[in-house]
Image (cartoon, grey):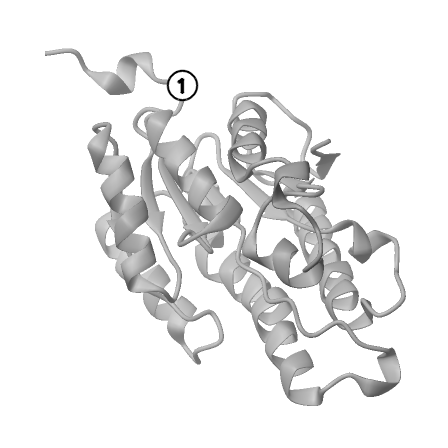
Amino acid sequence: MTDNSEIKPLGGQLALVTGASRGIGAATAIALAAAGAHVVLTGRDVPALEKVEDEIHAFGGNSTIAPLDLAEEDGISRLAAAISGRWDTLDILVIAAAVLPPLTPLTQINSKSFGNALTVNVLATQALLSAFDPMLKRSKNGRVIGLTSSVGAQPRAYWAAYGSTKAAFDGLLESYAQEVQNISDLRVAIVDPGATRTAMRAKAYPGEDPATVKEPSVVADKIIALLQKDFTTGHRERVG
């Protein structure tokens, strides 16, 4: 019997993907498993996670479902405890989950929807990095990939709520990249997917023809390629 871990680029590695139930998160989880990683799938929609896992198992990949609401108090710490109780290291963390609050003038932002976006897009990101920092640092090749948006770096009318959370998201990842740069082999990258065929994109651009934008698998392939490169921590790129 052939040992797939010897022939696949990410064989023997453990990956955690947030937002793995659909869109770019799901596509990335599938691509990671195809590249040989054991993937922990997190998200709120259990049936959707099971569908992703079924697809992974269909081609002989390995995955574990870990349902999680990033906004739930102590949810991330419980997840970290469960994962660290089974594995010693985490090699790849892909932060793909995000909430898009309603697009509206800044003066009309709803505090509840804005607060939820801040919790999932910002507070949960800090909690994930903090909770999994020890496991990532124990990896010989630990990598963190955060999925961002252009509106984080380039503010746009009516996108203030979402854009400000992504600006904070970028700041957290960039600061973390600098903090770990000289004390570990851990590397951090920020990826802007660009226009991609996702439910979030359809919500933001309801009149757009989905066929005019790329599929999530295109972004996933770019992430897999990036993970196989010796990129400098703090690396940032946009998928065209």
* Residue drawn at (40%, 19%) of the image: 9
Q: Nearer the viewer, residue 137 or 41?
A: 41
Residue 193 position by quadrant: top right
Question: Could you classify mark 1 by the number of other residues whose Cα lies within 10 Å: few (under 14), some (14-19), or many (20 or more)?
Answer: some
From the image, which quarter does the C terminus lie in?
top right
Return the residue at label 1: 9
Quarter of the image holding residue 200? bottom right
Does 172 appear above or below 108? above
Give the residue drawn at x 42%, y 36%: 139
| Total residue callouts | 1
Location of residue 63 in the rendering, given as x and y in whole percent from the top left corner = 26, 42
Residue 156 or residue 203, whichever sits in front: 203
- Locate residue 224, reporting x and y percent: 51, 28
Relative to residue 204, is residue 96 drawn left or right? left
Q: Amino acid at mark 1?
A: Pro
Establish if 160 lies above or below 226.
below
In the rendered image, the quadrant that contains the N terminus is top left
Q: Is residue 135 left or right of residue 85?
A: right
Q: Secondary structure at mark 1?
A: loop
- Closer to us: 207 or 98: 207
State whether residue 213 appears in this view. Answer: no
Q: Is residue 140 above or below residue 205?
A: above
In this rendering, does residue 170 appear at all? yes
**Farthest left residue?**
1
Left or right: residue 181 versus residue 199 is right
The residue that appears at 26% across and 53% down in the rendered structure is 50
- Residue 89: image x %, image y %? 35, 42
